[in-house]
Image (spheres, rainbow, N blue to C red):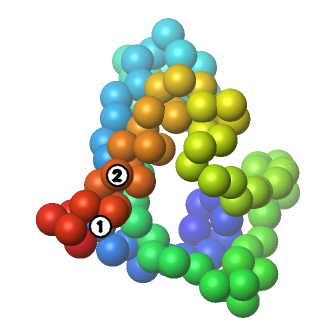
Amino acid sequence: MEELEGTAPVVQCLAVGWVPRQRQCACRHAVSGEILHVFNGGTWDDVRIGEIRLPPGGITAIGFFEPARHPDLLSSPDARRALSALRARSTPAAR
């Protein structure tokens, strides 16, 4: 709800990561770090994607990219976390 002004079912938690304080924190609060969770929100069809509304002052755009592009588009830790979540999603034990 916070990022895309919508809701999605949380099917499962795919990855959890710790981001230490020396990395810029988007929340702008004095914290020793933050814990990031990556959830499986299911597969969205074109209608569901079309319902996404970007709140003013927040995210300015979204995009959908092949996992092979993650290393080019994300920081190394974020790319590793995203690829780890994708592996967890495709593992039968994770379903």
Give the quarter of the image for residue 83. top left
Residue contact between numbered discs 2 and 1, judged by CB atoms under 8 Å:
no
Q: Quadrant of the C terminus?
A: bottom left
* Residue drawn at the location 67% of the way across and 70% of the way down: 5
Inspect the image, locate mark 1, and give the three-letter code of the amino acid beneath it.
Answer: Gln
Q: Which residue is mark 1?
A: 12
Give the quarter of the image for residue 2. bottom right
Find the residue positioned furthest to the front: 68
Q: Quadrant of the N terminus?
A: bottom right
Q: First in sequence: mark 2 or mark 1?
A: 1
Q: Which residue is mark 2?
A: 87
* Residue drawn at the location 77% of the way across and 81% of the way down: 50
Left or right: 70 in relation to 43: right
Q: CA distance from mark 2 to mark 1?
A: 13 Å
Which residue is more in the foreground, 17 or 7?
17
Give the quarter of the image for residue 19. top left
The disc at residue 51 is none
Classify mark 2: helix, strand or loop: helix
Q: Position of residue 25 (x, y in %)?
A: 56, 26
Q: Is residue 13 above or below residue 44?
A: above
Left or right: 23 in relation to 87: right
* Residue drawn at the location 50% of the way across and 10% of the way down: 22
Q: Is residue 38 above or below residue 12?
A: above
Say which of marks 2 and 1 sits in front. 2
Which residue is more in the foreground, 30 or 55?
55
Q: Position of residue 4 (x, y in %)?
A: 67, 65
Which residue is more in the foreground, 10 or 78?
78
Residue 55 visible at all: yes
Q: Position of residue 33 (x, y in %)?
A: 40, 23
* Residue drawn at the location 59% of the way across and 20% of the way down: 24
